[in-house]
Amino acid sequence: MTRISYLLQLASCVGFLWGAPAAMPGPAGTDPFSQPRSAPCLGTGEHDRLILRYSERHRLDPRLVKAVVAVESEFNPRAVSRAGAVGLMQLMPATAAEMGVSAEDLTDPETNIRAGTAYLALLFRAAGRLHGHAGKHHAAAPPRVVRRVLAAYNAGPRAMRGQAWAGVTKPYVRKIMRLRRSPSTLLKVSDGPRRTEDAVRPARRHERFTKA
């Protein structure tokens, strides 16, 4: 790659994130924008097929998932935060294990997106029961539910119960909600016929999120 091509590609990534400020955290208060990266962003469409596949599997809005990936890792599958969150969707190893994924596999894009979308779907189910959207398609959840799910993904499940979010959680939620409707999160591929694999089924202990 020539220097000019590299700079144009890097500028495209930075433009996608609209000059993302530093210290935008991941699940449970992680901070993916503060860590050194081993590779630059390779473009915003590289993982669209995987995002679409697993969003459909878990009845999620793929543009929401893509916005989460953008804010969490800037599309870098090898991103690691100082708190230990890993990969495209910045999953903590303990959370990944509860989704059936080992820590050493989190830098694999497909594995990370599979686990991350499973966790988002879990949070949507919990939020649906708490806020009157149970049993409905997650992609059609009203903004008040989506905001609480994003807060829980960022700051932990207890954030699902309120909106007085402290620290960086409020701008984190606002940023993803904005990016979700941006042309930048339009997916560039079609995944063809829907797949029939079963979704990742987290352990029953996750039901505690509705009672926290």
Image (spheres, rainbow, N blue to C red):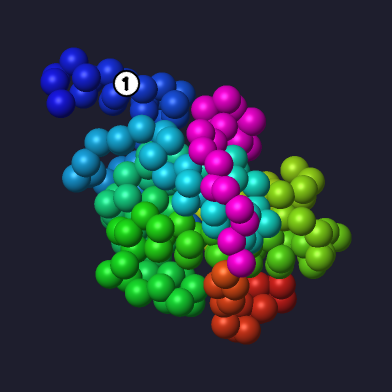
**Viewer can see residue 173:** no
Residue that appears at 51% across and 49% down: 51
The N terminus is located in which quarter? top left
Bounds of the magenta span?
176-196
Q: Does residue 87 appear to the left or right of 138 in the view shown? A: left
Q: Which residue is mark 1?
A: 11
The C terminus is located in which quarter? bottom right
- In the image, residue 175 lies in the stretch drawn in magenta: no
**Viewer can see residue 122:** yes
Closer to us: 123 or 155: 123
The residue lying furthest to the front in this view is: 193
Q: Does residue 158 appear to the left or right of 92 in the view shown? A: right
Residue that appears at 42% across and 34% down: 44
Residue 135, compared with residue 11, is above or below; it is: below
- In the image, residue 187 lies in the stretch drawn in magenta: yes
Residue 124, compared with residue 173, is above or below; it is: below
